[in-house]
């Protein structure tokens, strides 16, 4: 998400009354319309719900609120008390806030989870917390900071944090903000910004750089970097069936993009996604740019169709078998939901889903422990994708 979109379109920090219509100057021209799926309301009245996830084999839903709390939906009801409340530690302007949550694969036995937020100084913080004696409450005093990164601007903080199929932790960071990547951080391997990083937080405190990270041992390179050339990878996900990595990278002026790195190709190890040499498939700083060595998006759309891509998940649930293998994504401003399949380097079955659009701005998707998917709305609603009656 870019700051002008969040401040003008959503008005998260300024209390703007600019609704979705203020961001929808162009009607999207989309792919064929899909049928057979709809939305079921799970929770309302949340404070800008930005993410939803669940520990392995756990039926509860954990919802991240931008303003600093993590809420639980248990047995179909939103619990009154937060699982964790970091409001006093989190900056909440523009694209800042509590941005991501990932449960340790062994959460059921070790009670450990990781959060990503911007602190009161606006810096990125990645921290580890522990559960309390109450399984529905974390211990706020248990925070152990894993890493921090200074942010030169308030926007392009990234957001996603996730444990990959390899048990290692992946964190997506934007280019530090400002227009046009002024410090060329997208292509700067001496900096963590503009990258997805990969670290081991389970064997060493605060973390260990895996020996097979692509830039380990190279001089003037941060060894934590897994892939780079990203403007703002707000949401990425691993296909739980294949291990393929899908990244929704927010563009600037013309293009929004989805990048895919298959597990067979190393799930993005060492990949340069091109920003700010490229914006999508276009040369960003003028015609005739050098595209050698760059991984271009598998799918893009221009700003006649939307303004800010919201990456999602490949559906691997059981409720709607016809959707198996569809990757779902959305646009923040237009509020549409679309999907496609990706196999053998080819995008197929592009579909638009009017029945999965709740209205307003779609800021994120979520996935529960069973692989069912959810749509999160900036205005406070969380919805499960279910079979259409």
Image (spheres, grey):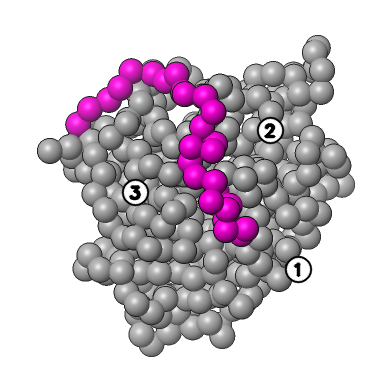
Q: Is residue 30 one of those drawn in magenta?
A: yes
Q: Kindly indicate whether the residue at mark 1 contacts the one at mark 3 (C-beta within 8 angstroms).
A: no
Q: Alpha-carbon neighbours of circle 2 within 10 Å: few (<14), some, or many (≥20)? A: many
Q: Main secondary structure of the magenta part?
A: loop
Q: Nearer the viewer, residue 56 or 350?
A: 350
Quadrant hosting residue 381: bottom left
Q: Residue at horizontal 78%, vertical 44%?
A: 178
Q: Which residue is mark 2?
A: 252
- Real-space Cα distance between discs 2 and 1? 25 Å
Point out the image quarter for the N terminus. Answer: top right
Q: Earlier in the sequence, mark 2 or mark 1?
A: 1
Residue 170 seen in the figure: no
Q: Is residue 362 above or below residue 69?
A: above
Label 2 secondary element: loop
Kindly report which numbered mark, 3 or 2, lies closer to the viewer in this rendering.
Answer: 2
* Magenta-drawn stretch contains 278: no
The magenta stretch spans which residues? 10-36
Identify the residue under disc 1: 121
Residue at 75% across, 49% down = 176
Q: Which residue is mark 3?
A: 374
């Amino acid at each position: 998400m870019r700051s002008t979109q969040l401040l003008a379109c959503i008005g998260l920090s300024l209390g703007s009354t600019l609704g979705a219509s203020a961001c929808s100057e162009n009607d999207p021209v989309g792919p064929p319309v899909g049928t057979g799926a709809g939305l079921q309301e799970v929770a309302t009245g949340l404070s800008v719900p930005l993410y939803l996830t669940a520990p392995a084999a756990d039926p509860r839903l954990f919802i991240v609120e931008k303003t600093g709390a993590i809420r639980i939906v248990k047995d179909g009801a939103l619990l009154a008390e937060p699982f964790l409340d970091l409001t006093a530690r989190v900056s909440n302007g523009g694209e800042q806030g509590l941005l991501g949550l990932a449960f340790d694969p062994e959460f059921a036995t070790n009670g450990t989870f990781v959060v990503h937020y911007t602190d009161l100084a606006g810096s990125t913080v990645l921290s580890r917390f522990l559960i309390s004696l109450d399984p529905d409450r974390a211990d706020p005093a248990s925070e152990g900071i894993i890493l921090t990164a200074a942010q030169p601007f308030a926007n392009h903080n990234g957001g996603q944090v996730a444990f990959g199929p390899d048990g290692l932790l992946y964190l997506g960071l934007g280019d530090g903000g400002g227009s046009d990547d002024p410090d060329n951080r997208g292509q700067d391997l001496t900096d963590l910004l503009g990258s997805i990083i990969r670290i081991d937080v389970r064997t060493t405190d605060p973390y260990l750089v895996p020996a097979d990270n692509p830039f380990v041992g190279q001089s003037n390179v941060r060894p934590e970097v897994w892939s780079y050339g990203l403007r703002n990878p707000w949401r990425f996900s691993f296909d739980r069936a294949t291990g393929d990595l899908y990244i929704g990278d927010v563009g600037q002026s013309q293009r929004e993009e989805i990048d895919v790195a298959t597990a067979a190709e190393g799930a993005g190890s060492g990949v340069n996604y091109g920003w700010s040499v490229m914006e999508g498939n276009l040369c960003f700083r003028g015609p005739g740019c050098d595209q050698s060595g760059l991984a271009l998006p598998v799918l893009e759309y221009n700003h006649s169709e939307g303004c800010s891509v919201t990456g999602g998940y490949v559906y691997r649930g059981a409720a709607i078998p016809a959707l198996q293998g569809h990757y779902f994504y959305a646009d923040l401003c237009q509020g549409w939901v679309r999907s496609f399949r990706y196999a053998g380097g080819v995008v197929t079955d592009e579909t638009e889903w009017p029945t999965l659009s709740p209205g307003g701005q779609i800021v994120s998707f979520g996935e529960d422990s069973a692989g069912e998917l959810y749509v999160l709305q900036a205005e406070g609603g969380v919805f499960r994708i279910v079979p259409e009656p």
